[in-house]
Image: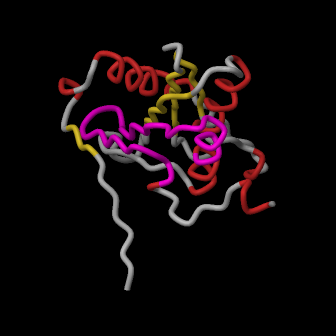
Amino acid sequence: MPIFEFDYEEYFDDQSLSELDYRLIMSAREISNQAYAPYSNFRVGAAVMMQNLEIVSGVNIENASYPVGICAERSALASAISQFPLQKIDAIAISYIAPLGDSNKPAFPCGMCRQFISECEDRNGQSIILFLTGQGGKIYKIKTAKNLLPFSFSGKDLK
């Protein structure tokens, strides 16, 4: 039986990160405070590092009609693509605040966001590094969203 596996890096604190990676992760952590999450109280922030080293952030925005909301990852990526349409995206950091739980471990993007990031990689023509973290603690560095979404659907499937 085939097995799907992938390698990722694990950091136990911020001290081991490059200055650029640290800046990106701190942007995601800080923007989490601005999320609009009156229903779940689960506030998520995402920060995107563009090829030109600009950082574009986004937050989750909930809505009483639940499907109408948007995740922080898609919010940040949509802003990045809108603001810098000709720039490639190098990385995205995702953090969260869970007032009733532990905010010091990595959280993973939902399936819809995994698909969205994967398609951004296709648009980019290169992988997007993912940094998954909470407000502190462990950090996961994953080389591509495709590792989180094996057998993904893409635009090639529509042709």
Q: Is residue 18 or residue 61 the one in the foreground?
A: 18
Q: Is residue 50 or residue 55 the one in the foreground?
A: 50
> Which of the 4 image quadrants contains residue 60?
top right
Q: In the rendered view, does 140 fall on the left or right side of 76?
A: left
Q: In the rendered view, does 36 fall on the left or right side of 14?
A: right
Q: Is residue 140 or residue 124 the one in the foreground?
A: 124
Vertical placement of residue 85 versus 134, above or below: above
For the image shown, how many numbered marks are present on the structure? 0
Residues shaded magenta: 118-146
Residue drawn where x is 49% and y is 14% of the image = 53
Q: Where is residue 74 in the image (x, y as percent from the top left)?
A: 64, 38
Residue drawn where x is 31% and y is 43% of the image = 140
Q: Where is residue 97 in the image (x, y as percent from the top left)?
A: 43, 36
Residue drawn where x is 34% and y is 64% of the image = 5
Vertical placement of residue 146 versus 91, above or below: below
Q: Where is residue 89 in the image (x, y as percent from the top left)?
A: 55, 28
Q: In the rendered view, does 33 fall on the left or right side of 75?
A: left
Residue drawn where x is 50% and y is 25% of the image = 33
Q: Is residue 20 or residue 101 the one in the foreground?
A: 20
Q: Position of residue 30 (x, y in %)?
A: 44, 21
Asked whether 134 falls inside the magenta stretch, the response is yes
Asked whether 74 falls inside the magenta stretch, the response is no
Q: Quadrant of the C terminus?
A: bottom right
Q: In the rendered view, does 114 fall on the left or right side of 99?
A: right
> Which of the 4 image quadrants contains residue 132?
top left
Q: In which quarter of the image is the N terminus?
A: bottom left
